[in-house]
Image (cartoon, rainbow, N blue to C red):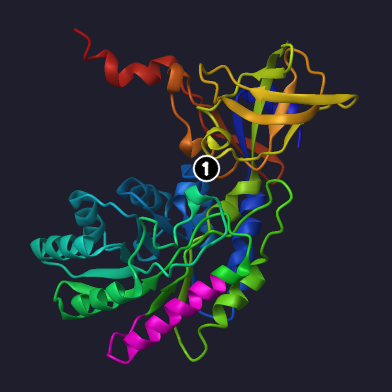
Amino acid sequence: MDYRALAQKYDTPLYVYDFNEVAKNYHAVKNAFKARKSLVAYAVKANSNMSLLKLLADLGSGADCVSIGEVKRALLAGIPSYKIIFSGVGKRDDEIAEAIQKDILYINIESEAEAERVELIAKELGKVARVSFRVNPDIDPKTHPYISTGLSENKFGVDIETAKKLYLFAKKSPYLLPVGIHFHIGSQLTQLEPIKEASAIVAELAKSLQKIDIDLKFFDVGGGLGIRYKDEKTIEPYDYAQAILSTLSGTDYTIVTEPGRFIVGNAGVFLTRVLYEKQTASKRFIIVDGAMNDLLRPSLYDAYHEVEVVGKNGDATLADVVGPVCESGDFLAKDRLLPKTEHGDLIVVKSAGAYGFVMSSNYNTRPRPAEVALEDGKDRLIRERESFEYIIEKEIRFMV
């Protein structure tokens, strides 16, 4: 990949996504479940660029959405309503109503209070809402605590006993139709056993519900497949599928899986230029034009991304790669062995396709970067760089 040419053409900071890699990763997940009816519902929150969603729509993907805005993005990109799931622990009444009216596949419900709201809103609309309940199996996913979601101490889902009550509630309601069961124990999962254990627990619940005539159609295993950022040993999609399917013998559910990071994470990079170097008595800093407002993961999670100075080798010494934002937490990498850099040198931050641009902001009145797609050897702009005027347009007309 000619990073220098891309930086010259589109400027920096810049996000670049390899759409061929995205397609390959999607097919890896889909093919892993080819022995069963399945739906790959891409987790839109990982990267919601419209061109990326259209690519996935064309491949046959569904969408797992956590806001009505993501639902609308998915529909606009060409993902049909019957492949769209609306998840999330806190949904507004207007979001619930719009999801019901758009006739999506189902709404994932995460609490008793939410079930009551969905029923009330469906009644007011005179419609039946297809629903699934998110079960919290109380399994430690062995991941970062900020992206762990399957423990009883997390805010997500309901315990097994509460889930049973909710399915009975939905069965009795003329306005709710329980069609699925859902779990998602966390993100960046690199160990198979917690996934298999959670699937077994939820599968037993689903089978017990079948005995009381609650016949579910969808077994939603969530997402969370991890990728390699540094030296992680990751899970192969085939092994992932086999672990889940081993818990579902004798059933005929459509398997729903919701990968996000796995599909786009390693398909993207973040390009940033060196402004200058700064050497203190104890520390070497490489100051670049990209910052925490562009790529938040290192500051938020202390996340590791590989960094590389394009076209430079030679003696390397420890350095922090930091941005211009007025925060000590503004860094992209810490204590990395990197060669001497000069103004204008290009640095590649790898594995930046997931939770990169989508988490960016205009902090310090910094315009968000452009996004570029690579496909079959060609590059194209899929989101233009923001301008100062764009940033202030929602404010300037209210000045008095």
Q: Can the viewer see residue 53?
A: no
- Mark 1, secondary structure of its residue: loop
Relative vertical location of residue 216 with respect to residue 113 in this rendering, above or below? below
Relative vertical location of residue 54 with respect to residue 180 in this rendering, above or below? above
Residue farthest toward the right in the current orientation of the protein:
314
Q: Is residue 74 magenta?
A: no
In terms of image quadrants, where is residue 117? bottom left
Residue farthest toward the top in the current orientation of the protein:
400
Q: Residues within 10 Å of mark 1 (few under 14, many from 20)?
A: many
Residue at 39% x, 20% y is: 390
The C terminus, quarter of image? top left
Q: Main secondary structure of the magenta part?
A: helix
Q: Nearer the viewer, residue 281 or 134?
A: 281
Q: What's the magenta region?
A: 195-216
- Is 19 left or right of 3, judged from the image as shown? left
Residue identified by numbered label 1: 355
Residue type (three-letter) at the residue carrying disc 1: Tyr
Q: Nearer the viewer, residue 17 or 211?
A: 211
In terms of image quadrants, where is residue 388? top left
